[in-house]
Image (spheres, rainbow, N blue to C red):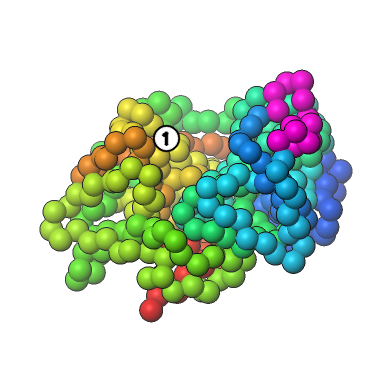
Amino acid sequence: MANATGILADRAIAELFEGGRLASEAKLDQDQIQPASLDLRLGSKAFRVRASFLPGPAHLVSDKLDRLKLHVIDLSEGAVLETGCVYIVPLMESLDLPAELSASTNPKSSTGRLDIFTRVITDRAQEFDKVPAGYSGPLYLEISPRTFPIVVRRGSRLSQIRFRRGNALLSDAELLALHKSDTLVASETPNVSGGGIALSIDLQGTGPDGLIGYRGKHHTAVVDVDKKNQHDVFDFWEPLFSRGRNELILDPDEFYILVSREAVHVPPLYAAEMTPFDPLVGEFRVHYAGFFDPGFGHAAAGGSGSRAVLEVRSHEVPFILDHAQIVGRLVYERMLELPESLYGAGLGSNYQAQGLKLSKHFRAG
């Protein structure tokens, strides 16, 4: 039985294409539709702009591009996007949403783990990454590589979109009840407030050396976003070890890959999202790529013990993280219906049953 409000599952996303509510310049990639989201693909041009912007309620994105663009980059054969620069790329997908459907977007997991800052923009937008109900028009992606220069091309997939009917967020009481029945995080005493369940940081480390994470290096070679197992870890990352101290000082504007202490579970009839920034727990941002699909960490889908990998960046001042300190919260939403495929169940999902793990682009040794 389908819920009255909730996140659209894979079958309903496919029906949006069939009904003309979603359109694309090219045929969909075979794995583009995920259990509760759709990967968005870059178009053939990138506009280097002076600064990030929102069009505002009276303007199209193209109007602002005409004024702010510095030059146009052809992505048809691939091109390098440099760190510290801002690019706007028209996406291959466009929308004609019915009045009852809204959408939100987020970077893909691999995008966040490369410290590529991305946000989707719509015409007349007053917010990033939010698509209002009934929106009809193109989609654009703002891209700003922060640590590594990257190679992208037409068809590269850096962002994903979710569609929802109504408000399906679980309340604190509903979250606690779901945790009691399905164990959302591996914690005997879950911390639930503000509609989210807390995750804490693991700084004890794994293995004989106590590996706790990685810090991104500067002045590296480029990362090709479409190639797996392409780059040596140590050319791009400095490993970090606990050395028995179980703490880590975050240096301002450095980028870290860390991992949650708790395993995370997203039951099949739910989707989850990490809230990216909570000033109440410290001046740092956690987890640029916030979507967790139905089935993440689900034992029946091969995900027992899946922990959340955290992309962490401190702001303004150095900040000391201690082991087991709360660093973020997961919010859960209902699905409208059960997806046909779960995360990790025959989908070639890269991060099911993960611990501390870099993006799919790197190989060890």
Q: For the magenta stretch, what is the residue range?
A: 55-68
Q: Amino acid at mark 1?
A: Phe
Q: Nearer the viewer, residue 95 or 170?
A: 95
Residue 163 belongs to the span the image colors magenta:
no
Q: Is residue 191 left or right of residue 121?
A: left
Asked if residue 67 is among those painted magenta in the image, a careful observer would answer yes
Query: Residue 19: x, y in percent?
Result: 86, 44
* Residue on which the image places disc 1: 277
Residue 141 at least partly seen? no
Would residue 139 appear left or right of 209 to someone viewing this image? right
Look at 82% across and 51% down and name the residue there: 24
Q: Residue 190: image x %, image y %?
A: 30, 38
Residue 341, horizontal then vertical, whole percent: 62, 58
Q: Residue at x 54, y 65 (%)?
A: 223
Q: Residue at coordinates 53% horizontally, 52% vertically from top-left?
A: 83
Please identify the quadrant where the N terminus is shown.
top right
Q: Quadrant of the C terminus?
A: bottom left
Q: Is residue 321 above or below residue 98?
A: below
218 in relation to 207, above or below: above
Q: Is residue 167 visible?
A: yes
